[in-house]
Image: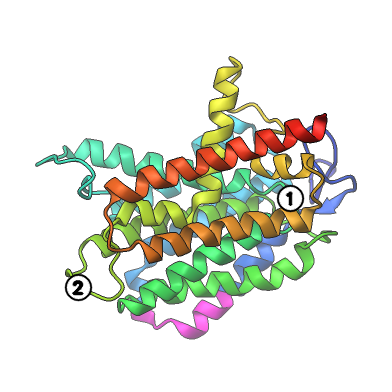
Amino acid sequence: MKQWKIYDSPGQHKIHTTFTPSLGGVAIFAGALFALMISLSLKNWMDSKYLFISISLMFFIGLRDDVLALTPKQKLYSQFLPVFLLVFLNGATLNSTYGIVDLPFIPVWIVWIISVLTLVILTNAYNLIDGLDGLAGSIGIISLTFFGLWFHSVGEETFGLIAMTFAGPLLAFLFFNWQPSKIFMGDTGALMIGFLLSFMAIQFINTNYNLPTGHPSKFQASVSTAVAVVIIPVFDTLRVIILRLRKMQSPFKADRNHLHHQFLNLGFNHSKSVLTLSAINLFFIGMAWILRDFTDHVILPLIVLICLAINYILKRAQAARAH
């Protein structure tokens, strides 16, 4: 029992300075599960059984890490079980290039590898942004609300309901996670929500791509729109990995180079940093909606250019502040 760790301790690369309860993910999961038991029919549960089993497994992996810490390798390797269930039994796969490049056929084993890596990378990317009071919760609410409303608009009521049902407990959690935070979601919540977002992103890409031309909710850029919705974890993770590799460091090495650290370095407090990053997320979603008639060949380079511009502005602002 002495080994149990239900508080997140300060120190190392962490920002908080006090011992804080870290099992907020339990409340998020319990709230969503209770709401889904009321709102979903038995048929809906059976149709989505592998999704719920996978999310539950990811929840318990995060809970195990929060209570009795796993090594980074143990935490990573254990995630492959729920990911494999989702890919091989639920069919959560990226099945084509979606018009980005012209390939007549993709071998099934490549489809499986790309799908597994997408789920694992995006799940952990969301987990990595959980370093600031209110940040992971705010980004999760924004992304899940978009997916929930969009799936509802195209008649995919079950996915829409699942997304909104998890967004609800996240909103309630945010009241206790806003600066000064009284509780963290921990890996229990971050891995679970990140995993759900990665599934929703894949489901969005496939569903949107197969919508008929002229549908009012169709985005011509399926992949780029999904990236825009989850841009903060994607941008942050790619950025820190590139920075670490340039310094000849392991991409898995923890540091204070995340986007939220950059805003703190500029003198922003937690709340202002979270609101700024949330505004950036909303800007990308709004841009994707305004430019929904353009293809990935236009939107994807535009997303990259804007991310590079944000990174440049942050570097210049910090250099000016240092002088």
Which is nearer the eye, 323 or 15? 323
Residue occupying the point 36% across, 46% down: 300
Q: Amino acid at mark 1?
A: Leu
Q: Amino acid at mark 2?
A: Gly
Dots 1 and 2: beta carbons under 8 Å? no
> What mark, if any, has residue 207 been given in the picture?
none
SS assignment at label 1: loop
Placement of the C terminus among the 4 image quadrants: top right
User: Residue 275: image x %, image y %?
Assistant: 69, 60
Residue 154 inside the magenta-drawn segment: no
Q: Residues within 10 Å of mark 1 (few under 14, many from 20)?
A: many
Which residue bears the numbered disc 1? 132
Residue 100 vertical position relative to residue 141 in the rendered view, above or below: above
Mark 1 vs mark 2: give the one in front.
2
Looking at the image, residue 34 sits to the left or right of residue 20; the answer is left
Which residue bears the numbered disc 2? 214
Q: Which residues are magenta?
A: 33-43
